[in-house]
Image: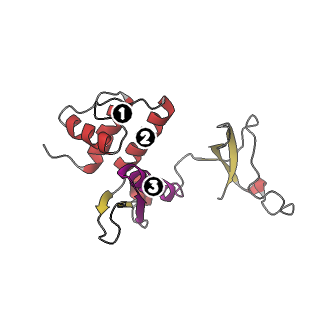
Amino acid sequence: MTISAQQLFAVAADLLAGRPADAAAEPEARRLLVRLDYLGDDAATTAPAAEIDRQAALLRAAARLKRVFALHPRAAPGLVFLGGEADPAALGPAYAGAPVGSLAGSGTSLRAAFESCIGEGVEYLSQFEAPGEVLAEAPPDLPRIDPFPGCEPGAWPAASRGWVRARRLGDDQPVLLPAER
């Protein structure tokens, strides 16, 4: 059975997350997880649950990319390079025809190159607004973040902009960021 790279990434994400997966694609998905060092040769992981969730999220993101491929430059033995393409059309028909983003990732392991490349794809696609993402009214229970602290008053007219839900990196608390409209 031949499956696409997108299907392989999706099945690998399901396996890693402990969800039922396509049995026919399972052996190939397990091999991918071992090559990425997400599973040991014994098909087990000792990673904390949060790390497994992060890895599964990266695999799901990879499944939404147009393509991911290996590059083999002769001048860099011992390094791993991946390339890819992120098509905004994967976010919905409103983005059909938007520029496809070129991605690159590198590292001394397949895992590092994969995470770098897929992370770049997530970063590129995150610039496109999802339906319902911008809130016109800011809920009063969430703190608002000033993206330009120290600027003169009025530099960011928050009253004329919407808000986007986010999480602070330091403590994972929910916050609101100003959205451009």
The residue that appears at 30% across and 27% down in the rendered structure is 20
Q: CA distance from mark 2 to mark 1?
A: 8 Å
Instruction: Tell me the number on the disc at residue 116.
Output: 3
Q: Residue furthest bottom?
A: 75
The residue under label 2 is 55
Q: How far apart in space, not on screen, are marks 3 and 2 (Cα)?
A: 12 Å
Q: Earlier in the sequence, mark 3 or mark 1?
A: 1
Q: Position of residue 142 (x, y in %)?
A: 73, 37
The residue lying toward the viewer, choosing from 71 and 141, is: 71
Is 28 on the left-hand or right-hand side of 36?
A: left
Tag 3 near tag 1, CB within 8 Å: no
Which residue was labeled with disc 1?
Answer: 16
**166 to 149, vertically: above or below:** above
Relative to 170, does residue 118 appear above or below in the rendering?
below
Residue 167 occupies quadrant: top right
Question: Would residue 62 be counted in the magenta stretch?
Answer: no
**Is disc 3 placed on a helix, strand or loop?**
helix
